[in-house]
Image: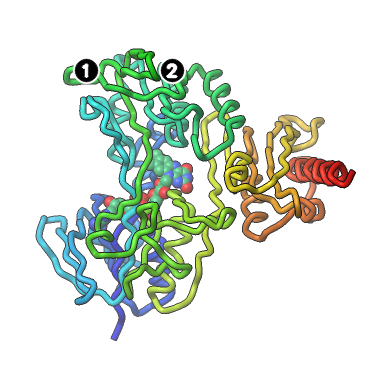
């Protein structure tokens, strides 16, 4: 008899799991259940809808070819209860009727939930968070009136940065308030955070780092935001507030099912994306992952890992074999004007781990200086002092940031050293590259530093 694979959640992880399950077992019944009223949307493109780079939210909402693939999708449906002994679950369907279905394999792809700190005034009109397409549409509508001039973004991480640079492009007065002393705290080095701050300030964005939001003030609608550090409070005018205060793994259902959670309050999975309960898999923002560089448990909370994990969960649930080794924490933040990317760890994180490292930073042209439109890129790389093993890099520039982050991601996953990078057969033509790539130049600088340090130690 054909097996029944049920997937809860149709975000990037759920879609990937459904596709992989279908391809791995052509006869299986594949059922997906999700809360959204549309098939799917592209969350990572929401800042571009808000800023008008994409014309409307309809651009990022899509219909899936599930019927052709014989995948059943229950939209506007919410799974309330799973009985893992009976292998059955109950969900409220789009007509609010309770349906019960059985499964042979279950994949939890319940994603993440927006974290809204308990700030007084957070429920006022024109205060938004950003998770679903409807949120992007609501923000777009609120900012489209000429009365919405002053926008306060609470949270200075990736989403806060992307949304603020889009809004500043629209000519809005944008302020970012970040409670930690730097932008993208715990993600990037202090020095790169300083560079991003300068670049955003050049766009006219005001940044208050190290400032807590005490209150969002208004009657019906938001009017002001009160922020403060110890002993000093400040009130900023605000017509619209966007809460870019992060997300947390959505473990509501997993917790009720008794699935084992990691200490980061996410679903614990093994390399096959199996949970602690037999025949139950999980993937995406709701799981914790192995950090390949630090060997610690971490949260990826990104679409790329979600898709890779979903594929592995789908293949294994269907009875084939695949493994997910973990993440090297590579990501990129895009603004209209520059890109920032990182893979691996920063010097500060290496210090915390007690690893002795050497780092170097270079700014070099991507294509030869004599070519038209030659642009520079800045790469800061760190490697272990003893053997030159690459531990991470931060990249900032207007072009090829993703390519360089990807080189580093591959180096980290394959355990390459700075010495290995010197001999990689990178291709060359003046229209696309330098003979010596910036990434090789920075590796070379690290090699020289390591050699000097080792020579000094010998004396
Ligand atoms: C503005 C923004 C920009 C982003 N930019 C990037 C980027 O540039 N790059 C990147 O890699 N990542 C980015 N991300 C993060 C990325 O969107 C997430 O990591 C990704 O969506 C996670 O996919 P997921 O399938 O695990 O979860 P989700 O996308 O959260 O999907 C989970 C789905 O499960 C449904 N669900 C949950 N519980 C139930 C239930 N009980 N019953 C039925 N359905 C349920 C939810 O309603 C949801 O539809 C961005 C996120 C945002 C908000």
The crowd level at tag 1 (other Cα within 10 Å; few <14, some 14-19, many 20+) is some
* For residue 341, above or below residue 420: above
In three-dimensional space, the C-alpha distance between marks 2 and 1, rounded to whole angstroms, equals: 24 Å
| Image quadrant assignment for residue 129 | top left
Quadrant (top left/top right/bottom left/bottom right) for the N terminus: bottom left
Q: Is residue 122 visible?
A: yes
Q: Is residue 418 left or right of residue 198?
A: right
The x and y percentages for residue 199 are 57, 23
How many labels sit on residues?
A: 2
Which residue is drawn at the image coordinates 37% and 24% (left, top)? 212
Q: Is mark 2 within 8 Å of ligand 1?
A: no
The furthest residue to the bottom: 1
Which residue is drawn at the image coordinates 62% and 50% (left, top)? 406
Element under disc 2: loop
Instruction: Answer with mark 2 or mark 1, whichever residue precedes in sequence.
Output: 2
**Residue at the spot of label 2:** 171
The crowd level at tag 2 (other Cα within 10 Å; few <14, some 14-19, many 20+) is few
**Residue at the spot of label 1:** 218
The x and y percentages for residue 447 are 81, 46
Q: Is residue 435 visible?
A: no
């Amino acid at each position: 008899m054909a097996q029944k694979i049920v997937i809860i959640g149709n975000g990037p992880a759920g879609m990937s799991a459904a596709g992989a399950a279908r391809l791995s077992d052509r006869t299986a019944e594949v059922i997906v259940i999700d809360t959204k009223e549309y098939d799917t949307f592209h969350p990572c493109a929401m800042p571009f809808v808000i800023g008008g780079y994409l014309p409307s939210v309809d651009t990022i909402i899509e219909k899936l070819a599930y019927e052709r693939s014989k995948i059943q999708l229950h939209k506007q449906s919410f799974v309330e209860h799973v009985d893992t002994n009976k292998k059955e679950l109950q969900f409220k369907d789009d007509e609010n009727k309770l349906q019960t279905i059985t499964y042979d394999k279950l994949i939890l792809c319940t994603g993440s939930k927006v974290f809204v700190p308990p700030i007084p005034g957070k429920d006022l009109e024109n205060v938004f968070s950003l998770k679903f397409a409807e949120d992007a549409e609501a923000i777009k509508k609120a900012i489209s009136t000429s009365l919405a001039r002053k926008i306060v973004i609470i949270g200075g991480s990736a989403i806060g940065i992307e949304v603020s640079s889009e809004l500043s492009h629209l000519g809005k007065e944008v302020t970012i308030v970040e409670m930690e002393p730097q932008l993208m705290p715990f993600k990037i080095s202090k020095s790169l955070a300083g560079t991003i701050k300068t670049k955003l300030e050049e766009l006219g964005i005001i940044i208050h780092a190290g400032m807590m939001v005490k209150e969002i003030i208004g009657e019906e609608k938001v009017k002001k935001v009160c922020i403060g550090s110890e002993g000093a409070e400040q009130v900023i005018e605000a017509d619209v507030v966007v809460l870019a205060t992060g997300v947390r793994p959505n473990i509501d259902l997993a917790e009720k099912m008794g699935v084992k959670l990691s200490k980061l309050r996410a679903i614990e999975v093994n390399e096959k994306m199996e949970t602690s309960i037999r025949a139950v898999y999980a993937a995406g923002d709701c799981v914790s992952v192995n950090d390949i560089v630090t060997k610690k448990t971490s949260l990826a909370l990104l679409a790329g890992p979600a898709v890779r994990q979903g594929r592995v969960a789908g293949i294994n649930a269907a009875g084939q074999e695949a493994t997910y080794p973990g993440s090297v924490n590579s990501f990129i933040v895009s603004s209209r004007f520059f890109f920032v990317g990182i893979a691996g760890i920063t010097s500060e994180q290496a210090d915390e781990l007690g690893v002795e490292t050497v780092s170097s930073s270079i700014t070099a042209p991507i294509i030869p200086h004599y070519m038209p439109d030659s642009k520079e890129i800045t790469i800061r790389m760190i490697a272990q002092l003893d053997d030159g093993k690459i531990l991470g890099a931060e990249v900032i520039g207007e072009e090829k940031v993703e390519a360089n982050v990807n080189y580093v991601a591959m180096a980290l996953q394959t355990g390459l050293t700075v010495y290995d990078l010197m001999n990689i057969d990178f291709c060359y033509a003046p229209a696309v590259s330098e003979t010596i790539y910036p990434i090789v130049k920075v590796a070379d600088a690290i090699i020289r530093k390591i050699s000097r340090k080792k020579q000094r130690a010998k004396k």
